[in-house]
Amino acid sequence: MKVLITGGCGFLGSELAQRMKQTFEVAMLDVQKPPPFLGDIDYACFDLNKDDLSPFIDEADMLIHCAVIQVPRINSEPWLGYRINVLGIQKVCEAVEESESCKAMVHVSTHEVGEEHVEERSRLYQHTKLIQEKIVEWYQQVGKKRYGIARIGTLLGEHMNPNTAAHIFVKNALDGKPVTPYAHSLLRPIHYIDIEDACRLIQNYAEQVLVGTSAPLVTFTYPTPITILELAKTVQALTNAEIQVVNPATGQLMHPAQTISRIIKAWKEQK
């Protein structure tokens, strides 16, 4: 069986390809080049915004859609985010429907779709991911192929997105710098998932979608969220790094007493 992965050179796509090529024939599409650890793998440079998907999908039995414009890029290039995230998913679903060989598709979404409160910087991203899910749900109802949606938590792993708090905290700590969480997001809970767990679960789900035994939507995250402050303390405990909370309004570091005072006030209000 051949699996086609769009966005195959991103963090999730490349790790998923590395895992799935042990069992299946895997092909990857992306505007980026594959990371070196993938070795020799079937890859084609592909721009979802411009290129025709049909020549690639007609050789595959299943498509796993990982291509996406994420935070922070979607905020600086919102129309590119719209074309890739929204118009792109429509293009992919249409190609799956029209393909003679491709039998199923799994769309990789985010747990943030189901969250009521998200950071302002994540709002555009959440909107496009919600629209993506609605388009896939439409095809689940009226399409002749099999479609699944896998929501995943924020990914943790050696090649994780450099813009994530976990990456920044660990890199700073290993570079001998303080771990600097922002004051306004200290208590924000995040649902994480290890990249290896995510790939294992997505592969299992994809196999179920292919044979028609899957749920239409699944969520893969570690059961208990942790806050940014807890994340910072975890990195501190493992590296002995100092924690310095940053006030983004001024760029100055807040005195720990100010932070503790605010935390106490916030927790009292939650009771």
Image: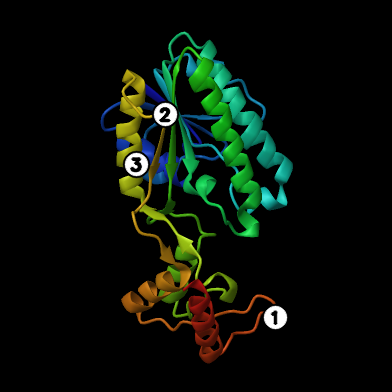
Neighbor class of circle 2 (other Cα within 10 Å; few <14, some 14-19, many 20+) is some
User: Of helix, strand and loop, which one carries label 2?
Assistant: loop
Q: Is residue 157 left or right of residue 50?
A: left
The reply to whether dot 1 and dot 3 touch (C-beta < 8 Å) is no
Q: Earlier in the sequence, mark 1 or mark 3?
A: 3
Q: Position of residue 61 (x, y in %)?
A: 39, 17
Q: Is residue 231 left or right of residue 84?
A: left
Q: Say if 133 sits above or below 231 in the image.
A: above
Q: Which residue is pictured at 32% across the width and 75% down the height?
A: 238
Q: Say if 147 sits above or below 110 in the image.
A: above
Q: Earlier in the sequence, mark 3 or mark 2?
A: 3
Query: Is residue 47 at all visible to an observer of this figure?
Result: no
- Which of the labelled discs sits on residue 199, or is there none? 3
Residue at which label 2 appears: 216
Three-letter amino acid code at the position of disc 1? Thr
Residue at which label 1 appears: 250
Three-letter amino acid code at the position of disc 3? Cys
Q: Which residue is pictured at 55% across the width and 17% down the height?
A: 95
Q: How many marks?
A: 3
User: Of helix, strand and loop, which one carries label 1?
Assistant: loop
Q: Which residue is pictured at 26% across the width and 29% down the height?
A: 23
Q: Position of residue 250 (x, y in %)?
A: 70, 80
Q: Earlier in the sequence, mark 1 or mark 2?
A: 2
The image quadrant where one finds the N terminus is: top left
